Image (cartoon, helix red, strand yellow):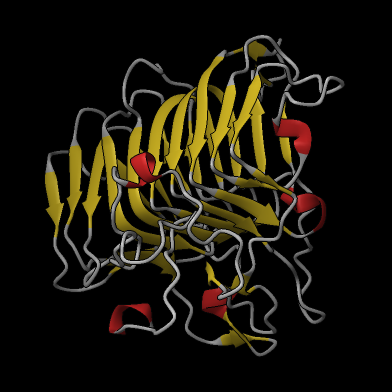
Amino acid sequence: FITEDTVLSNRIPYLIYDSLVVEAGKTLQIEEGATFYMHNNAKMIVKGRVTAKGTLEKPILIRGDRFDSYADIPYDHVPGQWEGIRFESDSYDNELEYVTIRNGQYGFDFQPSDPSRSKMKLNNVILTNFKGVLFNAVNCNIEAGNCEFSNARYALLRLIGGRYRFLHCTIANYYMSNQEAGWGNSNNETVQILATYDQLDGSEPVIYPVEQADFYNSIIWGQGSASDIRIEEDENVHAYFQNCIIPNKNATNDDPNDPNIEAQLVNCLIHIDPKFQITNSDNLFYDFRLDSLSPAKNVANVLISQEIPYDMKGNDRFLDQGPDLGAYEYKAILTKNDK
């Protein structure tokens, strides 16, 4: 229990057996390069505030604690190794930078909040390989730039009400089970933008207006039905996609028969494979950097890219014909940071 403002250093790794709880009104600061190994069913609960700021050279890592293998798959690639991270309703002003979080039951679970206050700012964050919903937010105010959200059995982003802004994000769902494993494949939409919040206690659903769900210079893709975007047919839902690759036309209003009249689409590529480097792997390792033939190359909005001129690997987006979509700028020759 973090009961006073606390700094957790990077001197040695942390092994969490039950839970790490940040109490209300308290701030947990995590140093660059810190590592957390989460035991089976362990979780993080944030009632106060977390600032976890790694660097390109010293990222922060949160993962399961097993180092052996399952059916020739390293447990570090197996989902469901620990529980997840929950941000309670009174938790605000959280900041994560250069943090990798993987292989739990769920990723981020943001409880109903006040969208006039910043819930979370994410920069250069990888959230990947979870057995449930990867990123669930209810009536929150969240900004994300240069982030990879990938591989979950259920939705990667479930946004219910609130305000959201995603810049240069790679949102890709290739979650799958190999023949020996038994945790199932994904059949949920990659992105869900909803106004209706079904309460767990079974009482009447609550309507939270989606004031803003903006996606710029991003890639939303996956395999099968896991690649789709679903936007609830509701006048309270407002979604906007600019210079993005998206899988289906549910997110556009240029079809007169599309009920999602509040969604807007500008300079997007629809149902065009972005061509990632590795999306089919026996040991469940994926590489969502762009292939040399990717249509995502050089087609990003330059003004938006100027807000984030360097990609997640530290590569300059303005050294070739133009910036690329997603969190990773294509490079023909791998640098030390790319390997």
Residue 203 picture quarter: top right
Q: Looking at this view, is 300 or 239 the one in front?
A: 300
Q: Looking at this view, is 284 or 148 the one in front?
A: 148
Residue 23 picture quarter: top left
Q: Looking at this view, is 228 or 91 the one in front?
A: 228
The percent coordinates of residue 165 (x first, y second) are: 44, 33
The percent coordinates of residue 50 (x first, y second) are: 26, 42
The percent coordinates of residue 148 (x first, y second) are: 48, 56
At 30% from the left and 49% from the top, the residue drawn is: 308
The percent coordinates of residue 212 (x first, y second) are: 50, 21
Position of 187 relative to 333 (above/below): above
At 32% from the left and 26% from the top, the residue drawn is: 118
At 25% from the left and 36% from the top, the residue drawn is: 49
Q: Left or right: where does residue 206 sit relative to residue 299?
A: right
Q: Left or right: where does residue 216 sit relative to residue 54?
A: right
At 72% from the left and 16% from the top, the residue drawn is: 261
Q: Going by the picture, which residue comes out furthest to the right?
A: 257
Quarter of the image where the C terminus is located: bottom left
Q: Left or right: where does residue 25 sit relative to residue 306?
A: left
